[in-house]
Image (cartoon, grey):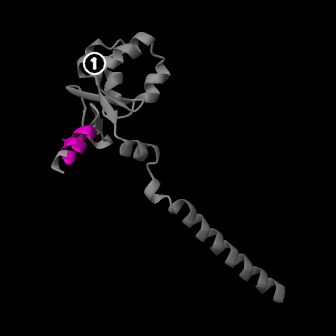
Amino acid sequence: MNESIDKDATDTNIAEDNCEKVEDGVKYYTLEDIRVHNMSNDTWLIIHDKVYDITSFLEEHPGGEEVLLEQAGADATESFEDVGHSTDAREMLQHYLIGELHMVSMVAFIYPHKADSWTTWLIPAIAATVVGILCRIYMLEHKSS
């Protein structure tokens, strides 16, 4: 029985180390992990849900290191695509790949206010109810006059 547990643990190959998870040789990082890497001596970017450590590339970047530091520790996908990087630049990016954005972080990134979603319908519903009641009261008072 212990052998099957060990085998299952080896098959899934999941480990945790400093909030990063390794699964099938791919490291997964959360947004919180990535956000702290926003300095010139430690620069990470997210591009298309992949995490890149571009610290050693800062001085080589043709557009200057400032444009990279503005995006450091965050998702730079839109900026990367807006510039229209060449195929060579996209291939070069692979040298700096260190992992991928963790799925939980992707959902939080796509739906940042998911926990507050009840406010998007509750507040308008209450406002509509109050307006309806006030309108009804106003109409009843003017009808009886």
Decide which of 17, 76 is in the foreground and name it: 17
Residue 47 as seen in the image, left or right of residue 25: right
**Magenta-drawn segment:** 4-19
* Quadrant where the image shows the C terminus: bottom right
- Place of residue 80 in the rendered image (x, y in percent of width and height, measured from the top left): 43, 23
What's the residue at 40%, 10% (across, down)? 88
Q: Check the image and name the residue furthest to the bottom.
A: 144
Q: Quadrant of residue 37?
A: top left
Q: Is residue 22 magenta?
A: no
Residue located 43% across and 58% down the image: 115
Q: Quadrant of residue 40?
A: top left
**Viewer-side residue, 135 vs 117:** 117
Residue 145 visible at all: no
Q: Is residue 34 left or right of residue 76?
A: left
Q: Is residue 137 above or below residue 10?
A: below
Position of residue 25 measured from the top left corner of the image (x, y, whole percent) = 27, 30
Q: Which residue is mark 1?
A: 58
- Residue appearing at x 55%, y 66% in the figure: 122
Q: Is residue 115 visible?
A: yes
Residue situated in front as seen by the camera: 143 or 132: 132
Residue 55 lies in quadrant = top left
Q: Nearer the viewer, residue 82 or 134?
A: 82
User: How many numbered marks, from 0 up?
Assistant: 1
Residue 69 vs residue 83: left or right? left
Residue at x 23%, y 18% (from the top left corner): 56
- In the rendered image of this protein, does residue 3 appear above or below residue 116? above
Q: Amino acid at mark 1?
A: Leu
User: Whole-percent x and y of residue 1?
Assistant: 18, 51
Give how far across and how far down residue 94 sits, in percent: 34, 19
* Residue extending furthest toward the left: 2
Query: Within 10 Å of the Cα at label 1, are there few (<14), some (14-19), or many (20+) other Cα atoms?
Result: some
Q: Secondary structure at mark 1?
A: helix
